[in-house]
Image: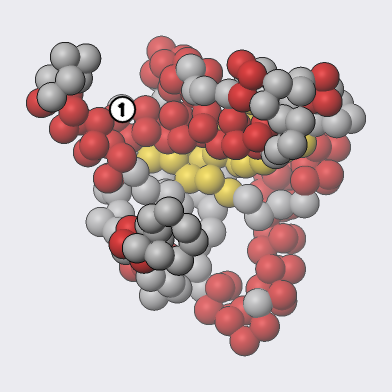
Amino acid sequence: MSEQAFSAAERAAVYRAIAERRDMRHFSGGRVEPEVLARLLQAAHQAPSVGLMQPWRFIRITRPELRQAIQALVEAERLRTAEALGERGDAFMRLKVEGIGDCAELLVAALMDKREAHVFGRRTMPEMDLASVACAIQNLWLAARAEGLGMGWVSLFEPQALAELLAMPPGSQPLALLCLGPVTAFYEAPMLVQQGWTESRALSELLFEDQWGTS
């Protein structure tokens, strides 16, 4: 065991947060205390980022009419997605895909503008800015679980329409609608597994050695 390791109880708490994190769709209203929200956003802000560019921007949605307009964008995309799914469209429409109307807090996670100025780590893989924002979202997700709060990532929206609604500058891009707040209970398994939409795959199927497809 490394001398830098956390205590057994601390390690167990970290792994528990990872194992019990769920993409939540069912919220019980309530509120997120300001000091808790501040801790969660600070956890997100402590995420790693390529070249330390910190490309994440968070927009807290507080106006009810704006939340309703965002939910309308999601509903429009939900219908388009169902159409694109063909024979699975009806099953998709029976899924609860967002908790925008019920969550205590709604945040938009976005990529900043003027990202082209950041070349360090992005010359051959410019999408690493998106990966950095994903790390920030995951930090927020795990911290929320540790605080006993649910969080759901909603990606059903047309990015340009949402960007215009939020008066975002050219070159920026919304990536996620994050529903956050108290929940009655966390799902025992991912909701899409519980609803029979898909199955989780074992790590052994996704781990290779030395070259693709070999174990």
Q: For this rendering, which residue is in front, 206 or 114?
A: 206
Residue 175 place in picture, x, y as percent: 67, 40
Residue 113 shown left or right of residue 32 in the figure: right
Given the current orientation, which residue lies at the most extreme bottom position? Answer: 87
Q: Is residue 93 left or right of residue 123?
A: left
| Mark 1 element type | loop
Identify the residue at image location x=41%, y=16%.
39
How many other residues sit within 10 Å of disc 1, few (<14), some (14-19) or many (≥20)? some
The residue lying furthest to the front in this view is 210
Is residue 206 positioned above or below 199 on the image? above
Vertical arrangement, residue 21 with respect to residue 88, above or below:
above
The reply to whether residue 148 is in sight is: no
Give the residue at x 71% y 38%: 125
Who is closer to the viewer here, 150 or 131?
131
Q: Hey, what amino acid is under mark 1?
A: Glu
Q: Is residue 147 left or right of residue 117?
A: left
The residue lying at 73 percent from left, 44 percent from top is 69
Relative horizontal placement of residue 51, taking residue 22 as reference (left or right)? right
* Residue 60 x/y as whole percent: 62, 26
| Residue position for label 1 | 147
Instruction: Please name the colour scheme applied to the rendered image.
Output: secondary structure
Q: Tell me what residue is drawn at x 46 percent, y 35 percent.
A: 138
Residue 15's x, y, as percent?
Answer: 24, 37
Which of the two residues, 164 or 20, is positioned nearer the viewer here?
20
Which quadrant of the rendered structure holds the N terminus?
Answer: top left
Image quarter where the C terminus lies is bottom left
- Position in image of residue 205 (x %, y %): 36, 65
